[in-house]
Image: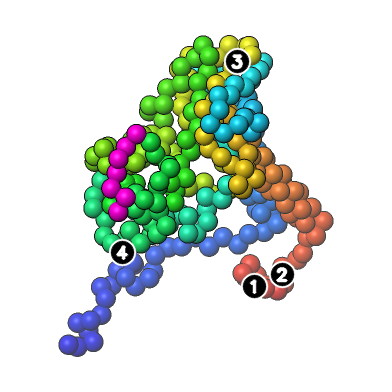
Amino acid sequence: MSEISNRPKDTAFRQQRLKAFKPVHTAKSSALIFLGSSLIFFTFGILLYVECNNQKEYWTTYDHCNIDEPCSVKLQISSTMQHPVYVYYQLTNFYQNHRLYVKSKSYTQLRGDKPSSTELENCKGARYNKDFTGYYKGKTLDPDTTARPCGLIARSVFNDTFTIEGYDIDTEDITTETDRKMFKSVDKSKEWTNMNEKFINWMKIAPLPTFRKLYGAIRKDVESEEITINVGNHYDVSEWDGEKAIVLSTSGMFGGKNIVLGVVFITAGVFCFVCSLVFTSAALFCKQKWVDQDPRSWKF
């Protein structure tokens, strides 16, 4: 085949003759860019900070409660919380991001399909029903059958319960539709635990050792008063010096009461504003004459 027949068509795109914008930034243009960036960061940062700071949040620990004994804690609500009010549990010093812990599950099994033996090797140590002895009650399961669900994440599922006097905690519709599609219960009689929405929230790995997970929601306003929370305390955290807390929080357009993102944006705005001042000073007091007519030259 001749060289002429292989030659690309004579178009601006194929012959790389497209027009291009190649700006040469001066101190003045750089100052304007940083100033504009700082205004954007300040706008979003202040909006995030104010919105998140306006959310109400109250919490209390209940580590003093004895395991498997009835316990009640008081929580003072100093200002009325508009519904929905979300109920979270918080764990401290629990490293869900450990490599062996993270991989100890079977996605295929959680979707309701039959996993391969190779995939089930990820559940080593928590693969069979006999590995879950003492973790379930009221069911008779074959000890040598593969547990549903298997894995260390499922076996360590949070099992404390909460009731609030005068308020109902709704534990339905606390996950996204996408999350619910990823978990499918095939035969509840062969499952050692209930794969409900609280279980789905637990299976979503937390990146930090202190984390919160959604337990439920109160669908009416919580009045300004002292409320009583009855705790079914079954989850022992003393083995790793952990702490447990229950959290009540409202939520806005940017989530709950978390000012970190707003502070980050404001900090970035301050940095960009300082840079704009530096470049403005350079443009005013450090003027240089052109040595070469070509602005792309290194000689200026």
Q: Which residue is mark 3?
A: 227
Q: Quadrant location of residue 179?
A: top left
Label 3 and label 4: CA atoms lie apart by 50 Å
Mark toward the start of the polypeptide (4 vs 2) = 4
**Residue furthest left as drawn:** 1
Mark toward the start of the polypeptide (3 vs 4) = 4
Question: Is 130 part of what is drawn in magenta?
Answer: no
Say which quadrant the N terminus sits in: bottom left
Say which quadrant the C terminus sits in: bottom right
Q: Residue at x 63, y 11 (%)?
A: 225
Q: Which residue is mark 4?
A: 118
User: Visible in this render: residue 2?
Assistant: yes
Q: Nearer the viewer, residue 197 or 132?
A: 132
Q: Nearer the viewer, mark 4 or mark 2?
A: 4
Q: Which mark is residue 222?
A: none
Estimate how packed mark 2 is, as few (under 14), some (14 to 19) or many (20 or more) residues with alpha carbons within 10 Å: few
Q: Are marks 1 and 2 in contact (CB under 8 Å)?
A: yes
Q: Are marks 1 and 4 in contact (CB under 8 Å)?
A: no
Q: Regarding mark 2 in the picture, which secondary structure is present there?
A: loop
